[in-house]
Image: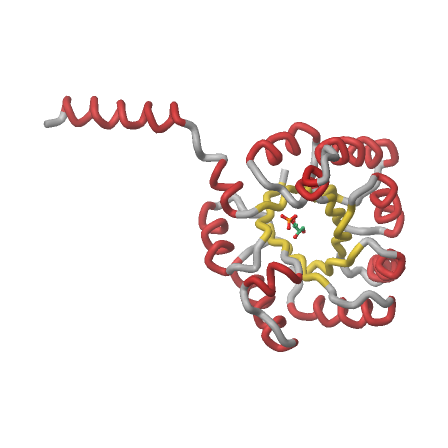
Amino acid sequence: MKFFIDTANLTEIKEAYDLGVLDGVTTNPSLMAKEGISGKEKVRNHYKAICDIVDGNVSAEVIATDFDEIVSEGKELAKIDDKIVVKVPMIKEGIKAIKYFSSEGIRTNCTLVFSAGQAILAAKAGASYLSPFIGRLDDISIDGLDLISQIVHIYQNYGYETEVLAASIRHTMHLVKCAELGADVVTCPLKVITGLLNHPLTDKGLAQFLSDHAKANP
Ligand code: E4P
């Protein structure tokens, strides 16, 4: 399973990259705004800066919602770097654009996915990645992990090549469950990736080892 970090913060991206387990980055307009990135040139430069840190894919989301504008914005984004994957919302015009990008060899990430039906449409249109949002479903008392399980099953039934990129991950159990269910990728905040390190018995065991070593080597 691939690990993507879900942020536009360069320090966090670098920290995850330095850990040696990072396979890519996802961003969205809210995450870009959180970093104070606005204006075409700044946005472009920021995506380039992210691409320069990591080895894998970097999802850059279009703001347009009309087919022609999504295509033109997506093509501009794709020109920034070979690592860019054009992130397109799950709307009618978005599906048409994903089909177009797919025929042009431009990789896409279909975002804001909340149902299996939407997942089927995106796969048929040729999306490279599909982003079902687990946490936002949990927020409205619908089990987001059930959706991951359903989509993985459907994609296996038909051999769809679209990769299931579980998004809106809030905690380490989401990540571990996604691995059990067979998601291809998880995208999550840095704290979820580093949270996997934690276990009190590891801390206790290490303290004991170091203390025993110190006693034997005064
Ligand atoms: C996915 O690509 C989104 O950027 C993201 O995972 C949304 O997460 P949130 O629901 O925590 O905002």
Above or below for 82 versus 148: below
Q: Which residue lies at the image location 77% right of the left edge and 58% below the top edge?
A: 88
Quarter of the image where one finds residue 186: top right
Q: Residue furthest front?
A: 140
Q: Which residue lies at the image location 51% right of the left edge and 55% below the top edge?
A: 13
Q: Viewed as shown, does residue 53 lie left or right of 57?
A: left
Residue nearer the viewer, 140 or 131: 140
Residue nearer the viewer, 37 or 50: 37
Q: Viewed as shown, does residue 38 lie left or right of 85?
A: left
Quarter of the image where one finds residue 153: top right
Above or below for 11 versus 169: below
Q: Which residue lies at the image location 50% right of the left edge and 44% below the top edge?
A: 191
Residue 106 image position (x, y, % from top left) = 77, 61
Quarter the N terminus occupies: top right
Residue 30 image position (x, y, % from top left) = 63, 60
Residue nearer the viewer, 87 or 138: 138
Residue 35 image position (x, y, % from top left) = 54, 64
Q: Which residue lies at the image location 57% right of the left edge and 68% below the top edge?
A: 46
Q: Residue furthest left?
A: 218
Above or below for 42 versus 178: below
